[in-house]
Image (tube, helix red, strand yellow):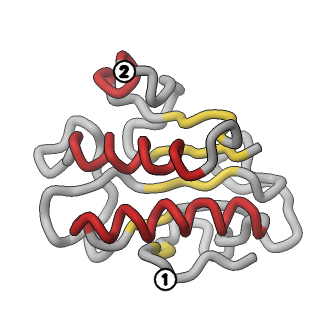
Amino acid sequence: MWLTRTSGAHSRADGNANAHWATAGAVGRLEAAAATFAGTGNGVLPIGDAGFEHGGDILGHGSHETGMDIDVWPVRTDSARCAAGRITWQSSTYDRAATRRLVQEIRAKVPGHIALVFFNDPQLIAEGLTTSYPNHDNRLHIRYR
């Protein structure tokens, strides 16, 4: 299923222009969380790479082949969420509180259906919300079951 700008989400290319496909279950779960998150006044959620329409390897990723992995950009404090480039958890425009709420909402929408969330913010890791993984300072990698 193609990820679109519906239900509070906005697809953004991460250098893989056609990597916006995921299973209907993964898309629906993320869109439900994004809609609730957008309703809190945080705006639309930028979505990075997911997968190719018929699966396969994606440049720069060790997974994303089966449509169960979706990258989401960290939340910004400014209004350039979908207009500007990605930020890291170290950036001055990174909104930790809103990113925390986002991860909590993603997990709450589908209890037991989140296999992992990679993101290197040490506070979110300490809270058990995310797990550290190389090269995940600038995106949340969500894997659904």
Circles 2, 1 touching at the beta carbon (< 8 Å):
no
Residue 137 left/right relative to 123: right
The residue that appears at 81% across and 53% down in the rendered structure is: 65
Image coordinates of residue 85 in percent, x first then y, are 31, 64
The residue that appears at 66% across and 67% down in the rendered structure is: 27
Note whether 92 is above or below 29 in the view shown. Answer: above
Residue 77 left/right relative to 123: left
Quarter in which the N terminus is drawn: bottom right
Under circle 1, the secondary element is loop
The residue that appears at 36% across and 21% down in the rendered structure is: 127
Note whether 108 is above or below 10 in the view shown. Answer: above
Residue at the spot of label 2: 127
Residue 89 left/right relative to 132: left
Which numbered marker is on residue 41? Answer: none
Which class describes the residues within 10 Å of circle 2: few (<14), some (14-19), or many (20+)?
few
Q: Amino acid at mark 2?
A: Glu
Residue 41 left/right relative to 15: left
Q: Quadrant of residue 84?
A: bottom left
Q: CA distance from mark 2 to mark 1?
A: 30 Å
Q: Amino acid at mark 1?
A: Arg
Which class describes the residues within 10 Å of circle 1: few (<14), some (14-19), or many (20+)?
some
Q: Quadrant of residue 121?
A: top left
The residue that appears at 75% across and 63% down in the rendered structure is: 25
Image coordinates of residue 20 in percent, x first then y, are 65, 71
Note whether 104 is above or below 16 in the view shown. Answer: above
The residue at the far top in this view is 126
Judged by depth in the image, the label closer to the viewer, 2 or 1, is 2
| Between 69 and 135, the one nearer to me in the picture | 69
Image coordinates of residue 137 in percent, x first then y, are 38, 37
Residue at the spot of label 1: 5
Quarter in which the C terminus is drawn: top right
